[in-house]
Amino acid sequence: MAFLEIYYRLKIDRCQSFLRRDIKDNVRIRAFDLRICQRRTSCPRCYSFCNRLFMKGDTLSKKSVKSSISTEEQKEKKENTKQSSLLGSVDKVVDVVVIGCGPAGLALARALSERNLQVVCIDPNINKPWKNNYGVWLDRMESLQLTDCLSPIWSNTRIHFDNNRTRLLPFAYGKVDRNRMKKRLMNICKENGVVFWEDSVEDIIQEQSYYSCRTSQQEKFTCRLVVDATGHFNSFVKFDTPHDPGFQVAYGIDVEVSRHPFPIDEMLLMDFRDSHMEDSLEAKTQSSMFPTFLYAMPMSSTRVFLEETSLISKPPVTFEHLKERLLKRLHFLQIEVKNIFEEEFCLIPMGGSMPSLSQNILGFGGSAGMVHPATGYMFSRVMEMAPVLAKSIENSLLHDEPLSKNKTISIWNELWSHERILQRDFYQFGGEYLSKIPLNDMRDFFWAFFMLSDKEWKDFLDFNLIGSLQRLLFGLHLFSKTHPALRLSLMKEALQNGKLKLLKSVIF
Ligand SMILES: Cc1cc2nc3c(=O)[nH]c(=O)nc-3n(C[C@H](O)[C@H](O)[C@H](O)COP(=O)(O)OP(=O)(O)OC[C@H]3O[C@@H](n4cnc5c(N)ncnc54)[C@H](O)[C@@H]3O)c2cc1C
């Protein structure tokens, strides 16, 4: 027994210290791990390593081993994996490699690891904070139990349509505390044994029925399923037809000011007032033809995040132009900037074609076209969809080894079910319409939109128009609230561009 104890301890030390192995060595380690697993009852500490280094196709399944261990052992396992999870010591076939640790990648890695799948996350920016400033509706984060990762939270949300029309929406809004949220998701992942690897993936190579992700440092991670969560622009995901989206563009600044006019208990979602653009005919025309609005998050009486936003344009409005407009607006509002903490350059592809649902690589988040095609929001959606997708991935991996093409297609179909595609088409019609109308029409459109019941407009924003009847009623109701000139332009757009896709989205 004493000999065995020393043997196991050596094994643990070795597990914790190794980073890379060549294939030959790897095979030896796997055989070695299997022996340890089979003797696990006499050495519970080893379990965590066996669990992580387990090879698919080994005679003992991870689940069968797991069912026999006690809660105490599980606790210890968690501790051990916590310490070693950043070592990246993975020389075997894991269940899933997630490429990208943005909100989508981490939300999915967390959900997969909570289902006991073996996950490796690869991202060159793992240890850097997320770059974007995210805003979300509080109610959606409440249902996800993530409200403690919001700061600040505003109890109301304001919209100014023009100088005479304003609305206070009865929904609280929060700014995501990027550091806290990322840390929260990563900590859960680490506790569940997710391995993080700091590098970028250059290639994905299919080797028989497995996939190898090769990084820029020539590391290779082999898995049964690859998830591309690299965001909107770095995607490995392929599209069936040329991807031709519209763009949300915004130029933002997080600033210290001497004073500002925004009530600090209100988040300003959209301010379409444009009195600052009346100093010349050219500025006035530009403002009318290329509508932009101010998005403002007052953090204190002297600190505020301000963003001049073009909701959707095709081709995209330039950052220089937005910056110019923002400075003009600040000058008009007599806001004196004392210090700029951060500048944000926001470019979000909106709508466009769908990723191919028959490819072997799964997308999630920006790479899978999950952004709301009419608003540019996605954060809460990936948090909500991650557990749904993780369940589907777990089911596919459980029943099929290696993962067949049909199984990957069925996971894609879970992400993009028929209903969700129809909903996207409906939203996309809205987004494309908004990209074409001048400022005054946009004001009237949103005035009508927010005249709907709170549930109706919120359902639209929250991806909750699931049934065709719901979409039809929403469309008819909104139509009834708009004034005649807008109705005419909506009808024209529906006939010229919405066509069959729009019709299907409200019928099927
Ligand atoms: C400036 C900005 C502000 C936004 N604000 C909001 C908002 O307020 N609310 C909202 O709901 N949505 C918002 N969005 C939309 C959407 O939520 C974000 O784009 C979100 O960041 C997308 O998440 P993601 O995880 O898909 O991609 P990303 O956040 O872009 O993360 C992708 C990750 O993949 C990594 N990566 C890329 N290539 C590779 C590679 N080859 N190998 C390994 N790793 C790789 C990157 O380093 C990055 O960490 C905003 C978008 C932008 C651009």
Image: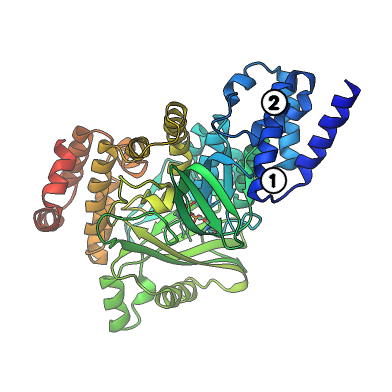
**Residue 27 in picture, x, y percent from top left:** 65, 41
Q: Residue at x 79, y 19 (%)?
A: 42
**Residue 125 in picture, x, y percent from top left:** 61, 58
Cα–Cα span, label 2 and label 1: 18 Å
Disc 2 packing (10 Å; few <14; some 14–19; many ≥20)? many
Q: Is residue 309 visible?
A: no
Residue toward you, 324 or 158: 324
Q: Residue at x 79, y 23 (%)?
A: 43
Residue 184, image quadrant? top right
**How many numbered dots are placed on residues in this image?**
2
Residue 423, image quadrant? top left
Position of residue 198 relative to residue 472, above or below, is below
Q: Is residue 285 visible?
A: yes
Relative horizontal placement of residue 257, taking residue 500 as reference (left or right): right
The label shown at residue 37 is 2
**Residue 484 in picture, x, y percent from top left:** 11, 54
Q: Going by the picture, which residue comes out furthest to the right?
A: 2
Amino acid on which disc 1 is placed: Asp
Q: Residue at x 42, y 62 (%)?
A: 233
The label shown at residue 323 is none
Q: Residue at x 57, y 63 (%)?
A: 216
Q: Is mark 1 within 8 Å of ligand 1?
A: no
Residue toward you, 296 or 504: 504
Amino acid on which disc 2 is placed: Cys
Please identify the quadrant where the N terminus is shown.
top right
Q: Nearer the viewer, mark 2 or mark 1?
A: 1
Where is mark 1, residue-wise? 25
> Which comes sooner in the sequence, label 2 or label 1?
1
Disc 1 packing (10 Å; few <14; some 14–19; many ≥20)? few
